[in-house]
Image: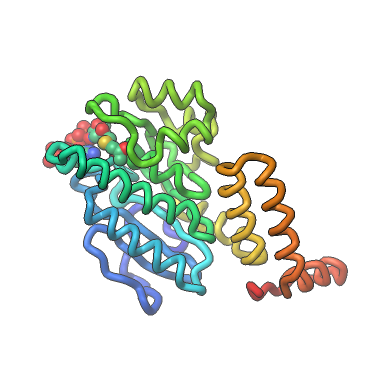
Amino acid sequence: MPSSTSASPPTTAQAPQAGTLTLENVIYEKKGGIAYVTLNRPKVLNALNTPTWKDLRTAFEDARDDAAIRGVILTGAGDKAFIAGADISELAQVSAVEAEESSRLGQGVLELVENLGKPVIAAVNGYALGGGCETAMACTIRIAADTARFGQPEVKLGLLPGGGGTQRLPRLVGKGRALQLILSGGMISAQEAYRIGLVNEVVAASDLIARAEAILGEISANAPISVRLSLEAVNKGMDAGEGAGFALEASYFGICAATEDKAEGTSAFLQKRQPQFKGR
Ligand code: CAA
């Protein structure tokens, strides 16, 4: 969906890149080095049931393993919802054991998203509630349409966030704000989400995908190994604590220094030209 002017799912006007997968509940297309992953259950506001989590896993595994893909844009079909959370009709039927399995499935997929080694932009085009807000939080960067709404309403259903929300939300917005959102189950606007640091930017809905593409374009111009190891240092460092994080950073700094791209990047700077990175 390159340079689309709407947040609707990719059209088939342009031929998708070879190897594009056909999935039941997710539209997956690859164009110009970007994988476009679009949740496609608009009748239920793109709610996440088990097959949809599995489709997401398949799509993200492909994006991770395809060397031609430099980043991913994740969005929802239609103009109303990014993802309105886990599928409540499925949740209504699950036993305790199945609910734990479902939580672990979602957590596993979101760990894959968070640690993909490539930037993933959540283009939040509407409701991002429960598992939808949690999915957005696992992404590297969140861009919201000005019409988007965020929340963790699980307590209103007799549940609690089961897709990593109790862990990622406080890390992003601080403990007090996270607890207010989680305990109240209330919804906030895109502007409020921006104010508290839940999203990086708010743009007009019509500019959402183009802005996500522009951010990926800026990142893709940089050395791929530097991008991957920066992501890994931040993610692992935040879990490991500052001491271990500093050690990891120094070690990754050393690894980058051994790459061809470091030789190219520093030479290009000194020769006052643009670098040609190769990911080596
Ligand atoms: N699961 C299943 N179906 C859903 C859904 C969900 N999460 N969210 C919306 N739908 C369905 C509705 O049932 C409705 O279906 P019908 O047309 O067949 O009646 C359709 O989508 C449209 O929704 P509404 O008519 O409710 O639309 P609205 O504009 O009046 O309200 C909304 C929009 C405020 C988002 C409302 O749909 C809503 O509150 N949805 C539920 C949000 C929620 O509680 N999410 C958390 C789920 S639990 C979770 O996510 C656990 C976890 O941590 C992983």
Is residue 141 visible in the rendered image? The answer is yes
- Quick one: 188 or 161, which is closer to the camera? 161
Q: Position of residue 21 (x, y in %)?
A: 31, 71
Quadrant in the rendering for residue 16: bottom left
| Number of marks in picture | 0
The residue under the point 35% across, 41% down is 163
Q: Residue furthest bottom?
A: 18
Q: Position of residue 139 (x, y in %)?
A: 47, 49
The residue under the point 46% across, 27% down is 178
The residue under the point 37% across, 53% down is 109
Q: Position of residue 165 (x, y in %)?
A: 40, 36
Q: Judge left or right: residue 247 versus residue 99.
A: right
- Quick one: 111 or 200, which is closer to the camera? 111
Instruction: Judge whether 171 appears above or below 140 on screen.
Output: above
The quadrant of the picture occupied by the C terminus is: bottom right
The quadrant of the picture occupied by the N terminus is: bottom left
- Quick one: 97 or 202, which is closer to the camera? 97
Q: Position of residue 36 (x, y in %)?
A: 40, 61
Q: How is the image coloured?
A: rainbow
Q: Judge left or right: residue 213 versus residue 22.
A: right
Q: Quadrant of ligand 1?
A: top left
Q: Residue furthest left?
A: 93
The residue under the point 62% across, 40% down is 241
Q: Judge left or right: residue 205 versus residue 97.
A: right
Is residue 274 visible in the rendered image? The answer is no
